[in-house]
Image: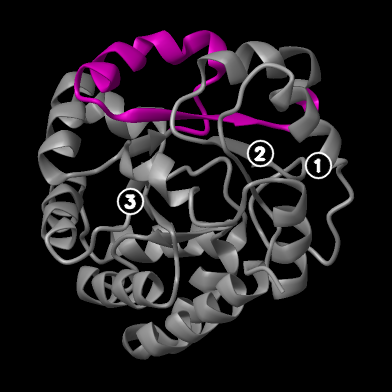
Amino acid sequence: MSRITDAFTHGKAFIAFITCGDPDLETTKEAVLAAARSGADLIELGIPFSDPTAEGPVIQAANARALAGGVTTDRILDFAADLRRETPVPLVFMTYANVVFSYGIDRFAQRCSEAGVDGVILPDVPYEEKEEFAPAFRKRSLDFISLIAPTSEHRVGMIAREAEGFLYIVSSLGVTGERSAITTDIGAMVGLVRASSRIPCAVGFGISTPEQAAQMASLSDGAIVGSAIMRIIAEHGRQAAPFVGEYVRSMKDALRPL
């Protein structure tokens, strides 16, 4: 069983997203380890990009700060290898096609594998173009995580049948960011997936409170949170790790059965 699959076998999964290098990689490491100790079942590591089209203002700003601080893909790959030695929690890179293209798809996949990374999410690569990346990832046993959105209705079965690791359900149209309410019929989206596949489904985009996390996880297999965590890091800077841990603990507690 892969680490990603295992993350969904202990109840509802809480998935934390953290941008690498904001404000520096030492803080990122402390925040990731705090999240893992506090119950995060899987960590998405964001590799910064200058034009992160799927991201809202909070994560865009985190990308800009990380890049201004001199973080590079090479440094993040080394960082991930170091992190893997300290935690067994599944690690998934989230970045953009251009980052992987410019690094070299095969070289990137090889470095991910060597670092002990478990999967990759490229939100700007549609299903129809995934085979440009998938063979290199598959060769290194990296799960290429697929996304489905509210507009994916007629393609959900097709995407779900070929999905690897887990299926990332985008809760809302638009970019990442905290929302006061999520109105998409997540239950119906999960139902479409279940008609074609038993792959775990986790919901992201817009979740920031324990109540929202519990609601989304009640309809799926887990909840993904990024902007709310990066807001904590933006607020507390190099002292953010304990606050990230406290927040993750509150979110994970909300997903535990009563």
| Crowd band around label 2 with a 10 angstrom C-alpha radius: few (<14), some (14–19), many (20+) | many
From the viewer's side, name the closer residue of 66 and 8: 8
- Ranked by sequence position, the earlier of labels 3 and 1 is 3
Q: CA distance from mark 1 to mark 2?
A: 8 Å
Q: Which residue is mark 3?
A: 90
Quadrant holding the N terminus: top left
- Residue 47 makes an appearance in the image: no
Image coordinates of residue 64 in percent, x first then y, are 40, 60
- Callout 2, which amino acid? Ile
- Residue wearing tag 2: 169
Q: CA distance from mark 3 to mark 1?
A: 25 Å
**Label 3 is placed on what type of residue?**
Pro
- Element class at badge 3: loop
- Crowd band around label 1 with a 10 angstrom C-alpha radius: few (<14), some (14–19), many (20+): many
* Residue 243 in sight in this render: yes
Instruction: Determine the residue positioned at 35% across, 16% down.
Output: 134
Which residue is at 29% across, 40% downward? 118
Say whether residue 145 is magenta. Answer: yes
Q: Give the mark nearest the N terminus, 1 or 2.
A: 2
Magenta segment range? 122-151
Q: Amino acid at mark 1?
A: Ile
| Rendered image: mark on residue 186 | 1
The answer to whether marks 1 and 2 mark residues whose Cβ atoms lie closer than 8 Å is yes
Q: How many labels were placed on the picture? A: 3
Could you say where residue 160 lies in the image, as x and y percent from the top left? 61, 20
Q: CA distance from mark 3 to mark 2?
A: 19 Å
> Which one is earlier in the sequence, the residue at label 3 or at label 2?
3
